[in-house]
Amino acid sequence: HTGPSDGQPPEDTLRRYLDRFSQHHGIPAELTIEPPGAELGLAADEEMQVFHFVQEAVSNAQRHADANLIRVRLETDPSRLRVEVADDGRGFDVSAVDGQGLGLRFMHERADELGGRVLLSSEPGQGTQVVLDLPHPPSHSASSRSDRTVALGGAS
C-alpha cells in the first residue's frame, strides 16, 4: 500500500515510492526538496493530489521516455509549491501531443482542483519536464496543520 496520510511526512512517502520505483524498474529516481528540510504543510487532499501527480509523471517517464534518470523536485516558499518531475529520456514535440494523452488530462484536472496549473516542456532528444505549480498555502492549511499535529499526537 503506497499512499500518503499514514502519519508520514509527504516527502518520506514520496521518497519511499521513488525508492521502490527505482528498484522495480532499474531507473534511478531522485527526490530534492528546496529549501532542504522544508515543511511542506500540505492538507491531506493536497498531499494526495501531489502524490498522484508525481506517480503519474514518473510512470509516464518510465513508459514513454526511455529515461535513465528521473528527478523529482519540490520547491516551497510561503506563497507556492512547485513540483517538478524531469527525465533525461527521448522527449517529444509538445505541440504534436494533444494534452489528452499521457495522463496529462488527469494532471490538469488535479491541478485545477487545487487552483494550480501544469506546465509541460519537452523537446525531442532533450528529456521532459512536467511541473505542477500550486498557490500555497491555500487558506486552510495553517489551521489544518496544527489540527493534524494534535490528532496525530493523540492517536499514538
Image (cartoon, rainbow, N blue to C red):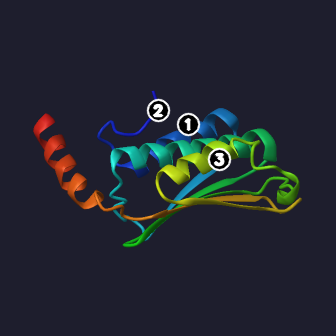
Q: Nearer the viewer, mark 1 or mark 3?
A: 3
The mark closer to the camera, 2 or 3, is 3
Q: Give the residue displayed 61% in from the left and 50% down from the top.
A: 108
Asked which quadrant contains residue 125, the reply is bottom right
Mark 2 vs mark 1, foreground winner is 2
- Percent across and percent down for residue 1 are 45, 27
Of callouts 2 and 1, the N-terminal one: 2
The numbered mark, 1 or 3, whose residue comes first in the sequence reads 1
Considering depth in this image, is 14 or 41 the residue closer to the camera? 41
Amino acid tagged 3: Ala
Q: Quadrant of residue 93?
A: bottom right
Q: Is residue 152 above or below residue 24?
A: below
Looking at this view, is 94 or 98 the one in front? 98
Q: Indicate left or right for 24 with 95 as reference.
A: left
Inspect the image, locate mark 1, and give the three-letter code of the amino acid beneath it.
Arg
Residue of label 2: 2
Give whichever of discs 2 and 3 has the lower sequence position: 2
Disc 1 target residue = 20
**CB within 8 Å, label 2 to label 1:** yes
* Disc 1 + disc 3, Cβ < 8 Å: no
Judged from the image, the secondary structure of the residue bearing numbered disc 1 is helix
> Tag 2, which secondary structure?
loop
Q: CA distance from mark 2 to mark 1?
A: 10 Å
* Residue 20 x/y as whole percent: 56, 36
Q: Spatial distance from mark 2 to mark 3, Cα to Cα?
A: 16 Å
Secondary structure at badge 3 equals helix
* Residue plotted at (85% across, 53% down): 90
Q: Are marks 2 and 3 in contact (CB under 8 Å)?
A: no
Q: CA distance from mark 1 to mark 3?
A: 15 Å
Packing grade of label 2 (10 A; few <14, some 14-19, many >=20) is few
Give the crowd class for mark 1: few <14, some 14-19, many >=20 residues within 10 Å.
Answer: some
Q: Which residue is mark 3?
A: 57
